[in-house]
Amino acid sequence: MKLRLNLSATPPPNQRPFLLGAFLIGAVSIALLVILSHAAFQAWGASSALRANTAHWQQQIAAERAKQASLAAYFDSPAAKQVLSRSEFLNSLIGQRSFPWTKIFVDLEKTLPPGVRIISISPTLDKGRAKVKLTFGAATNDGKIKFLRALEQSNAFSDVEVAGEKPANKQNERQASSDRVEVELTAWYATI
């Protein structure tokens, strides 16, 4: 048997550590690829369910917007506006009917000084509270001031604001000739 030896050359390097390292890195890379692929597939599945749910809600929103547009068109029609104005008028009549007229006259009687008289009362109901527009006539400035102070100190009236003051109009024969001034004011009235 002949054995060939080349003594002039260097021996071949040992490739085993490199191959073992490459194999381990490749195995770890394949394992990570499988894990990441599985996670990506699960994320895609979850996002597809989310996309389907979003599409369902977008369809429902579009349907509700169409309903809202049709209702807005209906309520903008002249017939609907007429019905709404009629219902507002009837509700205001019901509100005036339910206003405690007797109670307000009793409360005004307690605060009314001599020489002052009530000319008109106009209540409006706003969110369960009554806003009263009141016009009164006074024979003297002292009576006017006493009445305004009495209203401000009263438990029944709050936020009293004078809207205007003018000399009494003498052209009406039924109007008391002793009034020198007419005062308009607004106040919140406690109906309870």
Image (cartoon, helix red, strand yellow):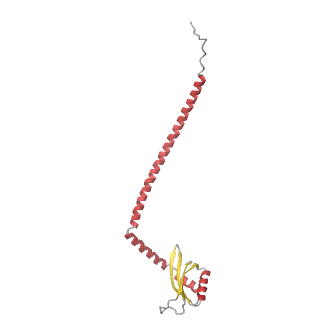
- Foreground: 173 or 155? 173
139, above or below 30, in the image: below
Q: Residue at x 54, y 88 (%)?
A: 181
Q: Position of residue 185 (x, y in %)?
A: 54, 81
Q: Residue at x 42, y 61 (%)?
A: 68
Q: Position of residue 157 (x, y in %)?
A: 58, 79
Q: Position of residue 90 (x, y in %)?
A: 44, 76
Instruction: Identify the residue at the far front of this view.
Output: 8
Q: Position of residue 100 (x, y in %)?
A: 52, 80
- Foreground: 87 or 149? 149
Look at the image and tell me in which quarter the C terminus lies. bottom right
- Foreground: 63 or 162? 162
Look at the image and tell me in which quarter the N terminus lies. top right
Q: Quadrant of residue 31?
A: top right
Instruction: Identify the residue at the far top of this view.
Output: 1
Q: Is residue 184 visible?
A: no
Q: Residue at x 44, y 52 (%)?
A: 56
63, above or below 1, in the image: below
Q: Residue at x 53, y 86 (%)?
A: 166
